Amino acid sequence: MSSHRYQRRHAILIAGWASSLLVSVLTLSFPSGVSASAIGSHTSLDGIPASAPLLAVANAVAAVKTWAPLPTVIVPSIATASSDGVNLGACSQYPVMTGKVCNLGDPTGAKTLVVFGNSHSVMWVPALSLIAKAEGWKLYPIVREACAYETYANLYQVWSPENVCSRFYNWAETTIKRLHPDVIVMGSYDETPGWISGEAQIVRQLRPLTKRFILFSDDVGGSSPAVCLARTGATQGSCAKPEGTNSLEVQARNIAASTKVNFLNIRPLVCEDETCPAVIDGLIPTKDDSHLTPQFSAFVAPALALAINLGGRHTIPIVPVAVPPIKPTWPGATTTTTTLATTTSTPGPS
C-alpha cells in the first residue's frame, strides 16, 4: 500500500473517532492459523495491513536517528496534545458514577467485549471500538479513570469501603456478570506502590466472569511529547525518549502468567529499537507521560486487531518491522540497518 493511500486511510479512521465515536463500516479478516511471522501478510482493517502502523513506527525511529525535522502538520496539534485524551463522557464512571452502560461496538453484535479499568484501559477504546465494529462484536467500556486497581479491590482493606473507586468496582463486577462477556481487555499501569498486587487481584476476581481475559502492558513513561515539540528548533531526534528496560512489561507478563490469562505487550506500537518517537506518521502518540491520544489509538487499530485475535484463543505477538537503513550524514560513513528483536506473548487458557 502506498504511503499516500495509507495516510488517507488512517485519516479516515481518526476522523471517524473524533466525529461520531467510531461509527464505521470497516472490514476485518482473520485467517485461521495465522502465525506471528505472518503479521501484516494476510490481515487488514479496511484494507490497511496490520504491519502498516508498525512500519510507521520504524520510519519514525529512522527519522529520530537522523534528527529529521518535524512534519509540517501534526495531529493533535502541539498546542492541544497535552489535553487531548480519550473522553467517554457519560459512558465512563468518572468523575460521576452515572451507571450508564454504552455499547461502542456493533449494536447487533453476537459476541461481547468488555474493556475494564482506569485511564490506561480507556486509552484503547478508539482502537477497540473500530475492531469491535469490524468484527461484529459489542463493546462495553466498564471504566473509571483516576483510580488505582488496588483501590478498586480495597487491597488489604486499607481504604474506606465507601471510597468512590471501591464503589465503582462493586458496581462493575455486577455489571460485567450481567453482560456475560466473551472477552475482557484490561490495561496495566505502574503509578502506585501497590499496583502489582492490586492488578493481580483484579485479574483473579474478574477472570471467572469471562471466557477469555487479555491483559495489556503499558506505554513507556516520561514527559509529555508536546512540551519538547513546542521548543524552538525541536526535531524528531531531540524529542524522542528512550524505551528503557520495560520493567512494566515484565511485571504485567508475570501477572498474566500467575493468573493464567492472555498477555499482550503493546510497546512495539509506540517504540522500536529502544526508541520511542514523539511523532509517528504525523501523529503525537501520547498526550502526557503514558496515555495515548485518541487519534493514535485509532491509528494502531489494524495492528492491535491482529494481536488481540478476538475470534481466537490466544493473543498474537506484535512483531516490529525492521528500522529502514539509516542514510549516512557524514563523509565516508556507511549505511547501516537496525534489526529489532521479536516480542513474545504468553498464551492463556481457552
Image (tube, grey):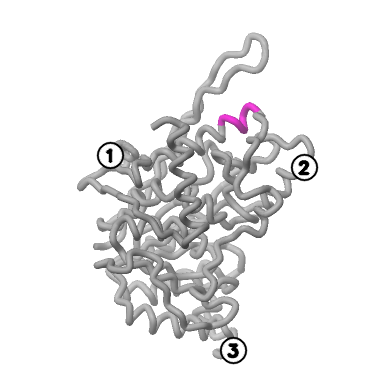
| Residue 95 in which image quadrant | bottom right
Comes first in the chain, label 3 or label 2: 3
Residue 343: percent from the left, percent from the top? 41, 44
The residue at which mark 1 appears reads as 42
In the picture, the disc for residue 160 is 3
Q: Amino acid at mark 1?
A: His
Q: Is residue 119 above or below residue 94?
A: above
In the picture, the disc for residue 125 is none
Q: Amino acid at mark 3?
A: Ser
Secondary structure, magenta segment, majority class: helix
Q: Secondary structure at mark 3?
A: loop
Q: Amino acid at mark 2?
A: Arg
Comes first in the chain, label 3 or label 1: 1
Q: Is residue 339 above or below residue 285?
A: above
Residue span colored magenta: 62-66
Residue at position x 57%, y 74% in the image: 147
- Give the residue at the far top of this rendering: 332
- Image quarter (top left, top right, bottom left or bottom right) of the N terminus: top left
Comes first in the chain, label 2 or label 1: 1
- Give the residue at the far left of this rendering: 32
| Residue 130 in which image quadrant | bottom left
Closest to the observer, 207 or 89: 89
Distance Cα–Cα, label 2 vs label 1: 42 Å
Residue at position x 32%, y 76% in the image: 209
Residue 215: percent from the left, percent from the top? 41, 61
